Image (cartoon, rainbow, N blue to C red):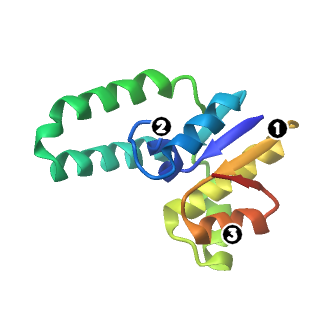
Amino acid sequence: MILYFDTSALVKLYVRERGSLVIRRQAGKADAIATSVVAYAEARAAFARLRREKPRSGKRHRERVGQLDRDWDRYVLVELSAAVARSAGELADTHGLRGFDAIHLASALWLKSAYSGDLAFAAFDRKLTAAAASAGLTVVG
């Protein structure tokens, strides 16, 4: 099974917060983890915000970034093609999603259409997970 992570789920692999344990367990069961290429910038922004909020966390920040960089090449990455961007626009309009949430959903749907095996979707935004379920994706998290 491929497990698609939006950024809120991906960050939980690197930051201990509510939902981290569930995400780590799900990741351990997956054959592969997938995400959009935009998740890298989003995750780094989340890590930087944590560092600003806790100024003494510089070492932990560097560790998180290093681990993300090491893991990144192992993830199945969905490029932000014109087709995915157009689909994201439609999904944003239909479901009232924010831009990056729509990109993640469009990316997961593109991957599902290109992959013959099982695919599950993980996110921690109710509107996004409802839209994913409505679009026919199995939602975990």
- Estimate the spatial distance between the alpha carbons at disc 3 and disc 2, rounded to whole Å: 22 Å
Mark nearer the N terminus (2 vs 1)? 2
Which mark is nearer the camera, 2 or 1?
2
Give amino acid for label 3. Ala
Name the residue beneath numbered marker 1: 115
Instruction: Residue at 56%, 36% (x, y): give it.
Output: 24
Question: Residue 139 location in percent, x, y?
Answer: 72, 55
Taking the image as shown, residue 133 lies to the left or right of residue 102, namely right
Quadrant of the rendered image containing residue 29: top right
Task: Return the mark for residue 13.
Answer: 2
Instruction: Residue at 74%, 46% (x, y): give it.
Output: 120
Taking the image as shown, residue 70 lies to the left or right of residue 94, namely left
Which mark is nearer the camera, 3 or 1?
3
Residue 83 or 15: which is nearer the viewer?
A: 15
Give amino acid for label 1. Tyr
Query: Would residue 79 be visible to someone looking at this image?
Result: no
Question: Residue 134 location in percent, x, y?
Answer: 78, 69
